[in-house]
Amino acid sequence: MDLIANLALGFEHAFSPTNLLYCFIGVFLGTFVGVLPGIGALATISMLLPLTFHVPPTTALVMLAGIYYGAAYGGSTASILLNLPGTPSAAVACLDGYPMSKQGRAGVALLMTTVASFFGATIGIIILTLFSPVLAEVGLAFGPADYFAMMVLGLVAAATLTQGSPIKGIAMVLVGLCIGMVGTDVQTGQQRFTFGIPELSDGFSLVAMAMGLFGVAEVIASVHRIRDQRAADRPKITFLSMLPTRDDVRRSWFPMLRGSGIGSIFGALPGTGPTIASFMSYAVEKRVSREPSRFGKGAIEGVTAPESANNAAAQTGFIPTLTLGIPGDAVMALMLGAMIIAGVQPGPRLVVEHPEIFWGLVASFWIGNVLLVILNIPLVGIWVKMLQIPYRILYPAILLFICIGVFSVNNNTFDILMVMMFGIFGYVLMLLRFEPAPMVLGFILGPLMEEHLRRAMLLSRGDPAVFVQRPISATLLALTALLLIWAMISLLRSNGAKQRGAAAVANEAA
Amino acid sequence: MKRARDYGDIVGGLLLIGAGAWFGIYALEYPVGQLRRMGPGFFPAVLGALVALFGVLVLIPALFRGAELPKIEWRPFFMVCAALLGFALAVERVGLVPATFVLVILASIGRRGFSLLPTLVLAAALAVIAVVIFSKGLGIPIYAFRWNF
């Protein structure tokens, strides 16, 4: 059977000593930055991107991917122990993880999140293995109009499924698209919005943007927010304290299955990823639970279900990136960038033309996840200790590595100044409560979207009806419309509820 | 501190309107073309208009509701920016090690309870790590010390 032969090829590549070593480095670093609040997978991958120029593409991707899903494992540790998420996708783990820790059940929570992570990731990888080749075949039939529609769906999903207001989300996507326009127009060679600055003729650098928005802005906001732990608050994690009760296991396995399903769907949809998946999964668990009042007070399924969702999404997020060449979020865009730098064009042909890269990567996910279980269960004590590194030591180090990382890309101090500008911009967005993630996605997809739109209109001789005549694009746009209608209804409903609430308060006061 | 209007979103909406209008109008300087053969100005002009439109949508509801003002961390904000600027200015002129000291000291002043001696120890340690990992280990062409004015 093809699948088995392909996987065998993949494992053959993944088990080479170099790839194994880089896989280990990736998941180790990933867990490390995932555990530490104030630095995440995105900043780490941007810092290490220039270092991957020197290794073969499969090896580079294996390591970068390991950072990404390794961070998804580590993120919940700080949520559980400190009530401070290590990564955005682990924010939801604070809700029930921290109460568990206060009840003296931190060990159980840590063990069960690792189990849930492994469970979710496994399901995610199975779906990735089974569906990517199919989707790649569908992808071969995609025309420019279909690509454009797919990107519209991804951007609208990213904008409307955020925590904040969907209107602000869409505004951020549009701002990102605008920023993506800066640089040389591919079709005419026209310089747009460069103001004669030669460094801008290739557009803004994604690495500088990501490090500014997610690295520097985060540091500014965290300098006084993250308090140093005193040794007395340190919980003791012994192996005995990690043993879950039979009740914990009974309550967890079905929510983990549901969480993995939700995570797989949101991961595979471009524009949405682990963070949205984990929040959705928590909301679903609370709704289907027979005792919703337990949530927020240390319910084990409130930790395990979102954790499965988050890790499943981290794996299935590779589906649109690898098979269609459409990155679902900023991390995937960096991954795509790494592939293009290495001379590999992602897209429907990748699976056929470079099976060793595609299947090698998939096989490395299996290996990486097993490594992560080993890193996270017996070595949990190390990660707990890491959390005691004072932030006053950590944040100058983060800033230094950001500077060196971005400087080494082009040996150019202009890029460091760009990081500073985006840091300021990101901090302003944070103060005004705008989400930077949809903007980054808009920035990445902007030039691609414009190119496909222009090509589609050229092919249809200026007839916009092409978007509804082609079945793939019509379906995708219909889904987009549904999503917008749903967002509008829920916006109106929540406003209505607020007004009614205010009226009730006013009545009582009267 | 709760204010009568949502000043955060009012500012955000106004910024979006301004930026979108400027972007869209500036884009019209480039050839726009027609639907069939779009010029480089077409897509950005449409985007600018849409940004301004969503700015209005953010602004209007904010005029009719109250919200808390965000708290700005001025000290970390200025010192982190100064640290990055200092590193950028120093690294090409005097090299990685002095630039690391500049960055670590400026960044550390950004936090309340700054004291010099531990900061210098941290800077020295980070400088050693940076030189060992980046210039020696990974072979990135970046001088530890230099004099280049």
Image (cartoon, rainbow, N blue to C red):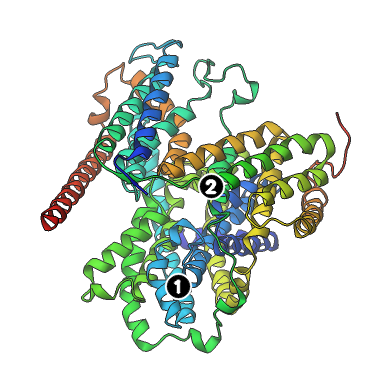
Q: Mark 1 points at which residue?
A: A113
Tell me residue A494's x, y (percent): 20, 49
Q: Distance between the residues labelled 2 and 1?
A: 34 Å
The kind of residue tagged 2 is Glu
Q: Is residue A89 visible?
A: yes
Q: Nearer the viewer, residue A46 or A336?
A: A46
Q: Residue at x 64, y 48 (%)?
A: A47
Q: Nearer the viewer, residue A264 or A377?
A: A377
Element carrying mark 2: loop
Farthest-out residue, front: A510
Subunit of label 2: B
Q: Quadrant of the C terminus of chain A?
A: bottom left
Q: Residue at x 59, y 46 (%)?
A: B75
* Residue A6 drawn above or below residue A120: above
Q: Can residue A56 be seen in this view?
A: no
Tell me residue B89's x, y (percent): 75, 34
Q: Return the mark for residue B73.
A: 2
Q: Which of A446 and A59 is in front in this view?
A: A446
Subunit of label 1: A
| Direction from residue A132 to residue A186 in the image, left or right | right
Name which quarter of the figure residue B84 lies in: top right
The kind of residue tagged 1 is Thr
* Residue A297 drawn above or below residue A332: below
